[in-house]
Image: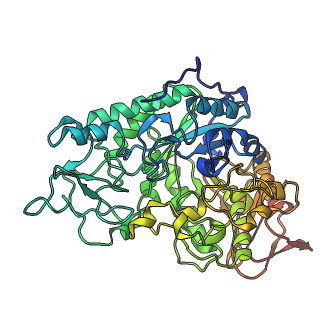
Amino acid sequence: MSQQHSAADPAPTTVAIARRRDWWRDAVIYQVYPRSFADSNGDGMGDLEGVRARLPHLRDLGVDAVWLSPFYASPQADAGYDVADYRAVDPMFGNLLDADALIRDAHALGLRIIVDLVPNHSSDQHEWFKRALSEGPGSPSRDRYHFRPGKGENGELPPNDWESIFGGPAWTRVADGEWYLHLFAPEQPDFNWDHPAVGDEFRSILRFWLDMGVDGFRIDVAHGLVKAEGLPDLGGADQLKLLGNDVMPFFDQDGVHDVYRQWRHVLDEYAGERIFVAEAWTPTVERTANYVRPDELHQAFNFQYLSTEWDAKELRTVIDRTLEAMRPVGAPATWVLSNHDVTRHATRFANPPGLGTQIRTAGDRELGLRRARAATLLMLALPGSAYIYQGEELGLPDVVDLPDEVRQDPAYFRGAGQDGFRDGCRVPIPWTREGSSYGFGDGGSWLPQPASWGELSVEAQTGVAGSTLELYRAALAARRAQPDLGAGDGVEWLRAPEGVLAFRRGEFVCVANTGGESVTTPAYGRVLLASGELTEADGEAKLPADTTVWWTTA
């Protein structure tokens, strides 16, 4: 049963928030993975009250909004992305009153709250799916999901050749002989978005949380939902290699845009500039732009940028393509380096290029941190909105040596599909130098933390000149203060040595040296911030390898 929201009024939006129009066009949005952020009750698992207690850290960091990964009622087969009740908080994280208090406190601190929404699939423990199983073949309840008879003489083969993102077939057979579709884990059956009840239900879910006072939704698997008519075979094995690179009959179908146009009507009924953010893996950034047309969603994650190597030429290409694709639809570009599904960029950049976004080796930690700091300043200088994943402001690396027995990523146990090493970026973050879980909570942490966590903690870095935390704080303060930073749809590229990106935005100049050697560039004005030490003399500046610097010419 859903918990009932007993508050008389939705969480108020502060005057400071309400007066800032088009806030989402240049917002810096911080992703909180609740189970790994802060634990208030000592059970080793982060929770909403823990997030609420740490909101002042996010205010002081200088972000505009907080995106919360799922905290809904769930069996946790995929870390909450298998939702059993979209109107309830899982007891692991608290209850609806805790969610209400979190939203209210965030607004009082000038922070907006964005919640995750998972519309492609539910949990197999959702009431709809349990009813579909109990009522059997031919029942109306089964039409809300994709149930099909199997192929073969006795229906022993899956209905088509689709593969699960987590490995293995995308179909599971039930006791009565029919099969159901799940593009992810078997515990995550896909909704049938051709059924009108599905659309009705999700519009109701949107209103429930909007009435609670949330400021927007991040849409999980936004490129999913609608499947090609007839569920045609894809053909061939190794289908995962096509993801994000080719047309798929279960992803990025044109019909999904009708869903988002209907959702936009719901959102626009509410005051306060609420927003939608799409997690949309598409073959091209041009296809991504389709999701952010004026009558659909507001932002879409830029996975092409996240996947780009630390290389000036490659970065310039994806920056130009992104800005060119977003300009015709009038949407802001977004920039992101890390999230809960990929290896942290401090570790990706510590390794040789070409290894992808899930990496199992620690690499050169010093090199990785130097590049990560430089990449952050580059990202925050670009026009549009930026995303920060919890702990990256501390320079946290991925934990690549977790014992097999503590891993919980479902893909790890499927033996194919995604590499299954996402746990490394989900290790609870450190707040203090000491303690059983470095300030995460009083009862340890659900994943083991490395011994190095104490010296990377918020406590250890606060007030320390040159620390990664203070670099983030300074960068976000400068971004707010500089009129030429934030929103925009273009940059003016400047001549620069090989391996260097240099661009101007009004009276602001950013130069990023992605190469392995120091370079000499013009000193463009007064230094605002640099990710590493640089020297200036006679109108020139010497930038060390893997360093970004911000100048103002004012």
Compared to 370, does 214 lie above or below? above
Q: How is the image coloured?
A: rainbow
Residue 384 visible in this rendered orientation of the protein: no
Q: Is residue 443 left or right of residue 272?
A: right
Question: Farthest residue in the right direction?
Answer: 538
Residue 446, percent across and down?
60, 55
Q: Quadrant of residue 131?
A: top left
Residue 105, percent across and down?
70, 32
Q: Quadrant of residue 516?
A: bottom right
Compared to 501, does 429 lie above or below? above
Residue 132, percent across and down?
24, 40
268 and 431: which one is in front? 431
Q: How many marks?
A: 0
Question: Farthest residue in the bottom direction?
Answer: 517
Question: Farthest residue in the left direction?
Answer: 153
Q: Residue at x 42, y 65 (%)?
A: 413
Q: Is residue 405 left or right of residue 347?
A: left
Q: Residue at x 65, y 45 (%)?
A: 27
Q: Quadrant of residue 536?
A: bottom right
Residue 56 visible in this rendered orientation of the protein: yes
128 and 103: which one is in front? 128
Residue 363, percent across and down?
65, 78
Q: Is residue 83 left or right of residue 26?
A: left
Q: Looking at the rendering, in which quadrant would you find the N terminus? A: top left
